[in-house]
Every structure is written in structure tokens, then in C-alpha cells.
Image (cartoon, grey):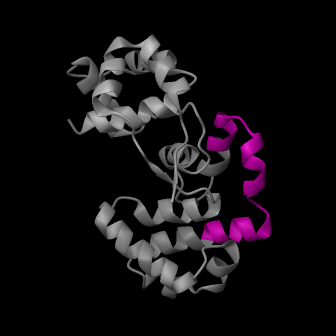
Amino acid sequence: MDFFRYSDVELNYLKSQDETLAQAIKRIGLIERAVIPDLFTALVSSIVHQQISNKAGATVWGRVLQLLGTVTPETVTAASLEAIQYCGMSFRKAGYIKSIGSAVASGELDLAELPSLPDSEVINCLSGQPGIGVWTAEMLMIFSMQRPDVVSWHDLAIRRGMMNLYGQAELTRPQFEEYRQRYSPYGSVASLYLWQVSKE
């Protein structure tokens, strides 16, 4: 299993920028978060897991893997819509997966070009696909592409983590942006810790 890559370089920078975050990092220690390096597999997995519990997502994902063997544009386009839906998802979700498979197989969506694009263009490119919104694109940037500086306003747990960390009852967008800029260029590592703090 692959994990999000970071080192003392990122941690020491974040600790030097924010004393409150530094205390959380020291308290929590090293965080290991699994990543899916293959972007197509990550795309399909993200659709499967949308709006369901982790346990349910793992069950459905296991069935998808059993059905397809290897998750590729070719295996997705070869599978019927009904077979994908029968794995335990809605007709709409199955349609999203088929649509992504067709887009990549036809070359309409070129995943190979994404690593060369800036974050904003990656988000525009991915969120233009059915079933992939801005939040999903941002999560793919962290947990598949391992982009270093992603802190998502659209993630409720990230915002809750910030409020817990700094003892705030609410969080405005300008406050969020101030924190996000403070964490840059290692916002993705800060996100790992904010997710952990959100549970406290």
C-alpha cells in the first residue's frame, strides 16, 4: 500500500509557521494516509465512495474489483451499466463510472496530461466530468496525485478541524484563506492534521 509522501521538511516548515498547529503535530505524531497512485482507479473509487459510509464503500468497492478484475477504462467500458450497478450503487453512480471510462478510453479526458497542469486547471478538467465536483477533484489531487498544497474549503471536516484547532465557533472564508496561505506550500500535510483534529 502507498501512503502520502512527506517528511520533516514539511512538518518543520508548518511548525515554524503556526505554533498552534505545531502543538497538534507534536501531539498526533506521524500520520499515514493511503493513496491510490493510478488516477483512473482513484476516480472510479471516489465515485463509489461518494455519500456513503467507509464500511459500505469498502463493500461496494470490493464488488467492483471482483467484477472488473483491474480497474481500467477498457474494463469499465466493457462492463454493462447493470453489472456495475449490481455491485451495490445507484443507477446514477454506475452511469458516472461508465461516463468516466468512456471519456478516458476515447481520449476526451487525458489523464496523462494532468500532472503537468497547475492545480486550478486540474480542478477545472476533472470537475467538468459527470459525478466529479470540486471537492472530489481536490481529494484526488491529494490522495492520488499527491499535490503538496491542497486545503479544501469544500471539506466540512477540514473547516471543523480549523475551528477545533483555533478554538473558534465559526469560520469565515477570509479566515480560512488566511490559514491556508499560512500553511502554503505544504497545505496538503496541514490537511492531514486538520482531519485528525476534526475528530477531537
Residue 43 drawn in magenta: no
Q: Which quadrant is home to the C terminus? A: top left
**69 vs 137: above or below:** below
**What x and y, as percent, mark residue 110?**
76, 57
Residue name at image x 31 percent, y 22 percent: 171
Residue name at image x 29 percent, y 61 percent: 53
**What x and y, as percent, mark residue 111?**
72, 56
Residue 41 lies left or right of residue 104; in this view the side is left
Residue 96 or 45: which is nearer the viewer?
45
Can residue 39 be seen? yes
The residues colored magenta run 99-123
Residue 124 or 188: which is nearer the viewer?
188
**What x and y, as percent, mark residue 114?**
72, 47
**Which secondary structure type mostly characterizes the magenta part of the structure?**
helix
Residue 11 lies left or right of residue 166; in this view the side is right
Picture mark count = 0
Can residue 89 be seen? no
**117 vs 130: above or below:** above
**69 vs 194: above or below:** below
Residue name at image x 57 percent, y 82 percent: 68
Q: Quadrant of residue 178?
A: top left
Residue 111 drawn in magenta: yes
Residue name at image x 35 percent, y 20 percent: 21
**What x and y, as percent, mark residue 48?**
45, 66
Q: Quadrant of residue 175?
A: top left
**65 vs 15: above or below:** below
Residue 26 lies left or right of residue 105; in this view the side is left
